[in-house]
Amino acid sequence: MGTFSVTHWIILLVIVVLLFGSGRISSVMADVAKGIKSFKKGMADDDDEQPKSKDNGTTIEHQASPKSETQTTKAG
């Protein structure tokens, strides 16, 4: 059993073309190319979003308001 020779690959290619037809193979290859392009675009979008999410963190700056000093008197 070993590796396939060139003639095996040619016979296999002819059988595939006969079964599916050349039009179907070209449309499948176009769909594969679109999928790869979409995958690369999605990966690039993920890389762009990561730095934004780090800078997108919110910080709350709080200054203490002056306490109003009220004196309570004890009745008694």
Image: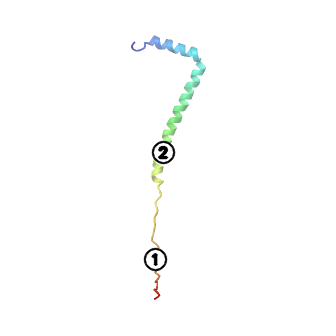
Residues packed near mark 1 inside 10 Å, few (<14), some (14 to 19) or many (20 plus):
few
Q: Which residue is drawn at 45% across and 64% down?
A: 61
Look at the picture and state if 16 lies above or below 62. above
Q: Where is residue 39 in the image (x, y as percent from the top left)?
A: 51, 35
Q: Residue at x 57, y 15 (%)?
A: 19
Q: Residue 15: which quarter of the image?
A: top right
Look at the picture and state if 73 lies above or below 49. below
Nearer mark to the viewer, of 1 and 2: 1
Give me the disc on residue 48: 2
Q: Which residue is drawn at 47% across and 58% down?
A: 58
Q: Left or right? Give the position of 15 relative to 1.
A: right
Which residue of the protein is positioned furthest toward the front in this rendering?
76
Looking at the picture, which amino acid does disc 1 mark? Lys
Which residue of the protein is positioned furthest toward the bottom in this rendering?
76
Q: Which residue carries the number 1 mark?
A: 67
Q: Left or right? Give the position of 7 relative to 29.
A: left
Secondary structure type for disc 2: helix
Look at the picture and state if 30 lies above or below 46. above
Q: Which of 74 and 30 is in front in this view?
A: 74
Q: Position of residue 35 (x, y in %)?
A: 54, 32
